[in-house]
Image (cartoon, coloured by chain):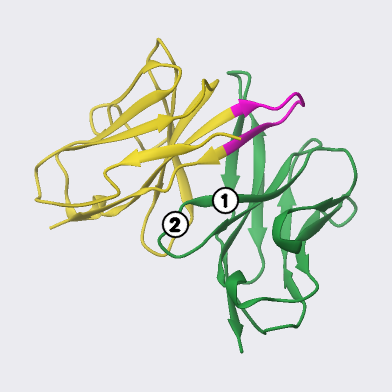
Chain colours: A green, B yellow
Amino acid sequence: AQSVTQLDSHVSVSEGTPVLLRCNYSSSYSPSLFWYVQHPNKGLQLLLKYTSAATLVKGINGFEAEFKKSETSFHLTKPSAHMSDAAEYFCVVSDKFSGGYNKLIFGAGTRLAVHP
Amino acid sequence: SAVISQKPSRDICQRGTSLTIQCQVDSQVTMMFWYRQQPGQSLTLIATANQGSEATYESGFVIDKFPISRPNLTFSTLTVSNMSPEDSSIYLCSATMKNGDTTDTQYFGPGTRLTVL
């Protein structure tokens, strides 16, 4: 079975400094991986996804993630944090399902705080 | 991408009553899903809403408690039955669209925040 572990429940950065949100996955095959963001009182927005193409994936709002098979990691980064980046971030792995579609397995989430 | 709306956005309900949540997608989608997000927690899949057949439930969720309908390719409902305070959560609907690759990207609605007194 697939699983995903987000290594930090809370991350705090200053505005303008780099962001690193860590994620490790467990998968018995080549997985599809996603990062979603949830702003307070809002739904989930897809930031980026990895689907076995380029290992460095660029997403929206300046975020990117690198798939490292040898480390089973899919860490999310951004060179310079903005106040509007403060939110909950979920690392997600897809699981094959007999119905012909992928089921999503969510990590516990990382709450990102950005300070002036 | 798909634009997904949910009704109601929030509700406060009494113990023992039921609430039906509606999910509307602006285009035809292949699969629809219902998730629960308990306070301070991550998302847990409740069930997959299949068009024209019964929903497929995850372990720990049953049809009597969470009946689901999906009458067409753009609409689904989730009912939370005989509610108790433990059902207080955010309920989210999502939908899968084929993007021409082998991965089905899921798009999420804004969620329904339910409080049971």
Q: Which label belongs to residue B28?
A: none
> For the residue marked with disc 1, what is the amino acid?
Gln
What residue is drawn where x is 76% and y is 76%?
Answer: A80
Nearest the eye: B24 or B62: B24
Residue position marked by numbered label 1 in the rendering: A45
Residue B41 in the image: above or below residue A28: below
Q: Quadrant of the N terminus of chain B?
A: top right
What residue is drawn where x is 90% and y is 53%?
Answer: A70
Asked which secondary structure carries label 2, the reply is loop
> For the residue marked with disc 2, what is the amino acid?
Lys
- Dividing the picture into quadrants, the one containing residue A41 is bottom left
- State the separation of the CA atoms marked 2 and 1: 9 Å
Chain bearing mark 1? A
- Dividing the picture into quadrants, the one containing residue B57 is top left
Residue A31 location in percent, x, y? 76, 39
Horizontal relation, residue A34 to residue A71: left or right: left
Q: Is residue B103 magenta?
A: yes
Residue A58 in the image: above or below residue B52: below
Labelled pair 2, 1 in contact (Cβ < 8 Å): yes
What residue is drawn where x is 40% and y is 39%?
Answer: B5
Magenta highlight range:
B97-106
Badge 1: few (under 14), some or many (20 or more) residues near its Cα, within 10 Å? some
Nearest the eye: A33 or B20: B20
Residue A36 location in percent, x, y? 61, 53
Residue position marked by numbered label 2 in the rendering: A42
Residue sitting farthest toward the bottom: A116
Badge 2: few (under 14), some or many (20 or more) residues near its Cα, within 10 Å? few
Residue B43 location in percent, x, y? 47, 50
Residue B73 in the image: above or below residue A4: above
Residue A84 in the image: above or below residue A32: below
What residue is drawn where x is 55% and y is 34%?
Answer: B2
